[in-house]
Amino acid sequence: MNGRPRQANSGKRIALSRTPRPSVSVAAFHRPPEEGGARRRRVVVTHWIHPEVVDYLRRFCDPVVPVETEVLGRRQCLELAADADALIMCMADRVDDDFLAQCPRLRVISTVVKGYDNFDAEACARRGVWLTVLPDLLTAPTAELAVTLAVALGRRIREGDALMRSGRYDGWRPVLYGTGLYRSRVGVVGMGRLGRAVARRLSGFEPSEVLYYDKQPLGASEERRLGVRAAGLEELMGRCQVVLSLLPLAVDTRHLIGRDAIAAARPGQLLVNVGRGSVVDEDAVAAALDCGPLGGYAADVFGCEDLTAPGHLREVPRRLLTHPRTLLTPHLGSAVDVIRRDMEIAAARQVEQALSGQVPDHEVTAELLRE
């Protein structure tokens, strides 16, 4: 199926208000009834999911699911989760110890994400709550989008589209010359699963060279197979016409591509970020677009999404939103309909495993729980 229906034809769904309210009554939500006096496991989903995933959940629990494409606010989520056995949560959610303290029945939080820095894994472990992620399903669509953004930014697609819509197009003119990947030197920051997937896709564009930076370099045979060469970050920034940031967020990666790294960039360099927003210093990017070496910036991830990062931004810097040489997408890395459905099913399956006494496939708290 494609698109998101405003109402589901199956499952128990709740309606969300589009405007903030000072208080939300739990009674205002559509809750599944108790059947035959026996309490079924209750699973709260914080965001829209496909109807067939709701049907899957109903086989073993009573799901509470939003009708529309909004995400439950923290207050709404806590009111619904107070007697929940499980939560299925997304990138927009945040869980800390205070949240967990208000959910005494909770046994598992199944996240539909790969990076879980918005979720306090240690607090989950202390309270005996499984925390699960999805490491295997996001790589291909995110790699696809990374290369798409690099091509679109370099070939000035945003500007070309605006010209066509302006009514000023009068046939071919020698304008909007850009940068292609063919015969360009490309840099990849982060050569994990996503970096390797991007490298494989880049090869079809025949770049002159692909450099990569990673604290754990690949073996020589893997480098030859992918057609990449390891380099230091300064060398990569100084030599590459196009750089893709693909790293997860950690203490040592926050603002890794910051003022110093950007100052070393090759003039006119195009920077693309599909890893995590806070790996790149967005204020430094904006400054370098105005009066520095950067020729353009494309991003699908933003610092305002990294809810637990130090100095967390509340919004995307306005200078990036208004700059003519930026290309920004609203976290579409995994936004392929069939992929999202598969991710939701995988998250639901891990809830089923946890509630039936099994160890979930992709839990991240086992070691912490044993300590």
Image (tube, rainbow, N blue to C red):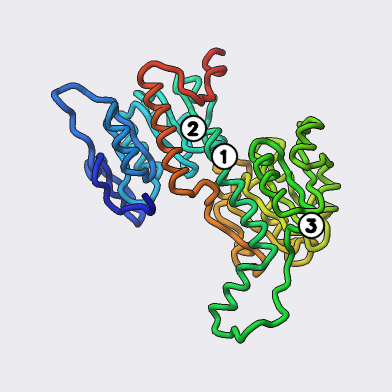
What amino acid is at disc 1? Thr
**Residue at image location 82% in from the left, 41% down from the top:** 229
How far is mark 3 from mark 2, CA to CA? 45 Å
Please tell me whether mark 3 sits on a helix, a strand or a loop. Answer: loop
User: In which quadrant of the rendered view does residue 127 lie?
Assistant: top left
Q: Are marks 2 and 1 in contact (CB under 8 Å)?
A: yes
Q: Which of marks 3 and 2 is in front?
A: 3
Q: Residues within 10 Å of mark 2 (few under 14, many from 20)?
A: some
Residue at image x 79%, y 58%? 183
The residue where tag 2 is placed is: 96
Which residue of the protein is positioned furthest toward the left in this rendering?
A: 36
Instruction: Give how far across and how far down residue 126 sits, in percent.
Output: 49, 20
**Above-or-below relation of 75 to 238:** above
The answer to whether 354 is drawn above or below residue 154 in the figure is above
Residue 247 - label: none
Badge 1: residue crowd in 10 Å (few <14, some 14–19, many ≥20): some
- Give whichever of discs 1 and 3 has the lower sequence position: 3
Give the CA separation, mark 1 to mark 3. Answer: 37 Å
